[in-house]
Amino acid sequence: MPEKRTIERARKDAREGKAPSTQAGEFVREEIEHIREGKHGARNTKQAIAIGLSKARRAGVKLKPPSSGSKRTRTQASRDYKKGQSSSRRKPNATRSRATRSALKREPHRAASKKALSAQAKSASRRRRKAS
């Protein structure tokens, strides 16, 4: 569950007319903070970003599923998007939530280091430059 202040910041971005990716950035930032403070870990920086984007979609940010990527990623992203756009809220399964959290706790915390984030940003920008 995202923190109240993260949702507020994302809503503020939406009111200001900022792009959905900017709104989702608040959730990604929250996830990086969680890893840094030791709440849980992530296998790599990409996973940390993916968790943040998933939370953003589920919180109602109008962030469309990616057109590229694996079939599984696209399917999950569209499922998260639909869940965020619907008004019905069901109580999450406690057992499943606990299992997910304990699995993430076993992961390393270096995914949110400055070095890892820098490497991720550089590789992402390299990919973008080729496309344009």
Image (cartoon, rainbow, N blue to C red):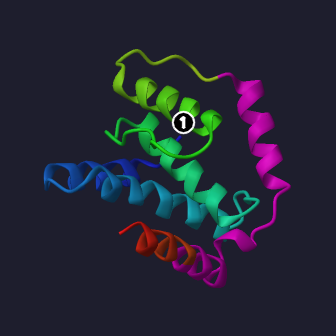
- Position of 72 with respect to 77 (left or right) is right
Question: Please, what is the three-letter code of the amino acid marked with disc 1?
Answer: Arg
Q: Is residue 85 above or below residue 45?
A: above
Q: Position of residue 95 (x, y in %)?
A: 77, 26
- Mark 1, secondary structure of its residue: helix
Q: Horizontal placement of 123 versus 109: left or right? A: left
* Relative to 90, 88 lies left or right: left
What residue is shown at x 56% (from left), y 58% (from top)?
49
Badge 1: residue crowd in 10 Å (few <14, some 14–19, many ≥20):
some
Q: Is residue 94 magenta?
A: yes
- Magenta region: which residues? 93-122
Q: Position of residue 60 (x, y in %)?
A: 35, 35
Q: Is residue 96 magenta?
A: yes
Spot the residue most to the left.
Answer: 16
Q: Kindly report the secondary structure that dominates the magenta region of the rendered protein.
A: helix
Residue at 68%, 22% (x, y): give it: 93
> Between residues 106 and 82, which one lies in front from this camera angle?
82
90 shown above or below 34? above
Q: Which residue is mark 1?
A: 74
Name the residue rendered at 75%, 39% in the picture.
100
Q: Nearer the viewer, residue 57 or 95?
A: 57
